[in-house]
Image: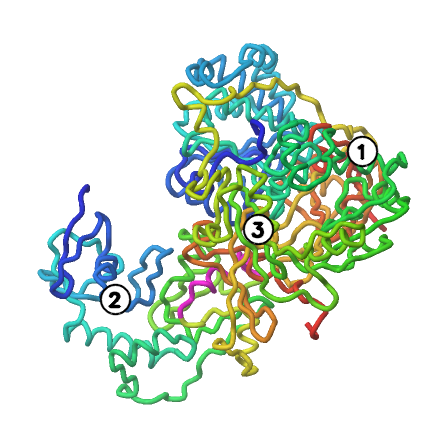
Amino acid sequence: MTGRRTVEVDGTAVAIEPGATILDACRAGGVDVPTLCYLETLTPANACRLCSVEVEGSRTLVPACSRIAEDGMVIRTATDRVRHARRMILEFLAVAVDLTTAPELLEAMAVYGADPSRYGTDDGSPRPDAVVDNDLYVRDLDKCVLCYRCVEACGDDAQHTYAITIADRGAAARVATEFDVALPDSACVFCGNCVAVCPTGALMVKTEFDMRVAGTWHEEAQTVTRTVCGYCGVGCNLDVHVQDGAIVKVTSPFDHDVTAGNLCIKGRFGWTHVRAGVDGA
Amino acid sequence: MFGAGGGTSSYEEIEHTDLIVLWGSNARAAHPIFFHHLLKGIDNGARMIAIDPRRTESAAWADLWLGLDVGTDIALANAVGREIIAAGLTDDEFIARATTGFDAYAESVEPYTLDHAADLTGVPAEAIRELAHAYAKAPTAQLCWTLGITEHHNASDNVFALIDLALLTGHVGRYGSGLVPIRGQNNVQGGGDMGALPNKLPGFQDVADDGARRRFEDAWGCAVPAEPGWHLSQMFEAMERGDLRALYVIGENPAQSEADGTRARRALDGLDHLVVQDIFFTATAELADVVLPAGAAWAESEGTVTSSERRVQRVRRVVPPPGNARDDIDILVDLARRLGHDWGQPTAEEVWDELRSLSPIHAGMSYRRLEELGGIQWPCRDEEDPGSRFLHGRLWEDPPRGPKAPFTPVEHDPPKDELTDDYPIRLTTGRHLDSYNTGVQSGRYRSPRRTGGTIDLSPEDAASMGLAAGERARVISRRGSVVAPVRIDRSLRPGLAFMAFHYPEDVDTNRLTLDEWDPKSGTAEFKATAVRIEREP
């Protein structure tokens, strides 16, 4: 497994390192491939297939995020077949799920001309309400696309707490705690590392959820400043989101090697002492 | 260790090591993101051995847990050392090339046979043997510890006992092998870096070093005393003697964080003048003559902090300090001006650049480079220097550079607060995942996991005392008593109780603890208190 290899992406030769995926090759070649369940810090779950591409000699479409690129592979990312598959994946998601807080997916729908209305309009059947069972984060299963990112982040890929997994099958499938208990009664340790990886806002910190409900969440008016957590001595980097002079959310950079985007409950939620008691906080 | 106080390794190394020894650390709760790196190591195939009186949520991840009695770490470490020597598992080449004092060390550990250590520590001899053989035979090993080692009256000796094991086996100075103290507070490492130690100038330069002192005197235009100052425990003794009459406390809450809190408050009460600079009106501030409201360092000021892997990183002002609160530098400069010294109006970066000009290990860390590189690990001697992933690689060079690393023989010395019929239970203290120290900051967010202050008992002790979960019990030590609800904790063995210290308004745990302190570091023995527990009517 030594030596670089070469693949062809949409007619252009791209040199890659051994072990690189098709997605890595595409990105190295400057070719945009949409992803949904994939995240750099997580093991590919192969759940959404939005990154599907054609590989010469392969009968089916191939998920770019997880398939290791082989020397001489011929990859096509923009064929009718690929575009058709992506469009239908997006349409199927959009008819079943509320994507209003998933801007990247909405953008992808525009790019691929996805039109969920051709499967009919909302039949008015009841949709799940957001679950507000604690002060730190909210679960809205109506926005969940079952991408498995939260399950992976809670499990082997980061937190190793295993508080959540996919329960049931088919249309009943959903992310749940053990025996479907409320989060405070579950194994959850409220690190919020699931919230950090959620691509659709199905998991959302409570401050953001409340402000969205009140219509006061204005992301375009927010600043994000990098600092270091004030609690223990590990030195986790924090990205502090500020709106109108007040902290509204704390995240951590995925590309920093101390945290890889992860935090503990104190780092992610323990910031309310800043300006406590002033400005009505 | 070996002169400059800092862990030898990077977090990344624990992901690629062969053996993880976690000694006196519940990192899963107290350092959760360090534990992420540790878990990657386990996922990558490392074995883990945990040494802790409690079978903590960290120990639950270990292949082997050594549940030693509180304060018997040296007996255990010396037995491990003796077994490594007796079994012929020492790294003789490393010992010869890089260390001094092996013979005296070998002689000192000779009495610590496996059976004798089993008697002293409560750990089965076979488990001690397994730890010794695993550590000595591992190609690489990370020996990690926290306050379970350092909050004892013989804290420094505990650390020496662990360093000796690394020297015996060559587990230091190589990628994947090192000594890893994980720091409890976000800038306790940085405080040491900056010379907030009684015997050090910034950059761990000794106050007794004439050349170093002269550089600071030239830069500052004043004389720097050659004698070490007092550490915190010595300050409290000086207050009791009346030798220390005025105290300026910045960002610390000793009225609630000091061991033997009743005595600490009495000392603070007896001062002529107490100034407290803090972000909240803490219990210590309540005792003060003057309170200076300050900004929260991590979010309302510019500067740097140093993490447990010696990485200096930037903190930035996210929001301005509220109301009358001011930046720490601003307060200090203004105070100096009132005392007749005009320090100008330096920015945090200007203060840092002065530090860089005086501390060689920080010299290459410009703000620009700290930003570009996401932090830099010291030593970083110039602006071409990428910083140091691990320390003491010099010991492996041919020939080794610099002074050799000395073995330091140390003897078992049990906790000062003796167990007797009147005080039969060993109380140890520690942290909860969602809280921090005396709760000044962490008490202000709403955690679904917060249990509040409890007295945690083993199922066996609770049963024999006739106490059920949630019932209130009085915990009595030789210095004071507190009342707390009972929590049953299966991680505890009979005779061992646990309390956190995050909720002093409700349960002031440090009213119980003993301020017998380590003469070298000044750290009090928070981890070993003798108590009895009675039902509270």
Q: Secondary structure at mark 3?
A: strand
Q: Nearer the viewer, residue B228 or B308?
A: B228
In the picture provided, is B128 more to the left or to the right than B423?
A: left
Q: Nearer the viewer, mark 3 or mark 2?
A: 3
Going by the numbered disc 3, the residue's amino acid type is Thr
Residue bearing mark 1: B423
Q: Chain of mark 3?
A: B
Q: Position of residue B255 (x, y in %)?
A: 80, 48
Residue bearing mark 3: B304
Categorize mark 1 by other alpha carbons within 10 Å: few (<14), some (14-19), many (20+). some
Q: Position of residue B57 (x, y in %)?
A: 55, 45
Q: Position of residue B180 (x, y in %)?
A: 53, 35
Which numbered tag is attached to residue A51? 2
Q: Is residue A195 above or below residue B361?
A: below
Categorize mark 3 by other alpha carbons within 10 Å: few (<14), some (14-19), many (20+). many
Q: CA distance from mark 1 to mark 3?
A: 45 Å
Q: Nearer the viewer, residue A204 or B120?
A: A204
Q: Secondary structure at mark 1?
A: loop
Colouring: rainbow
Residue at point 53% right, 75% down? A209
Numbered range of the magenta stretch: A185-199
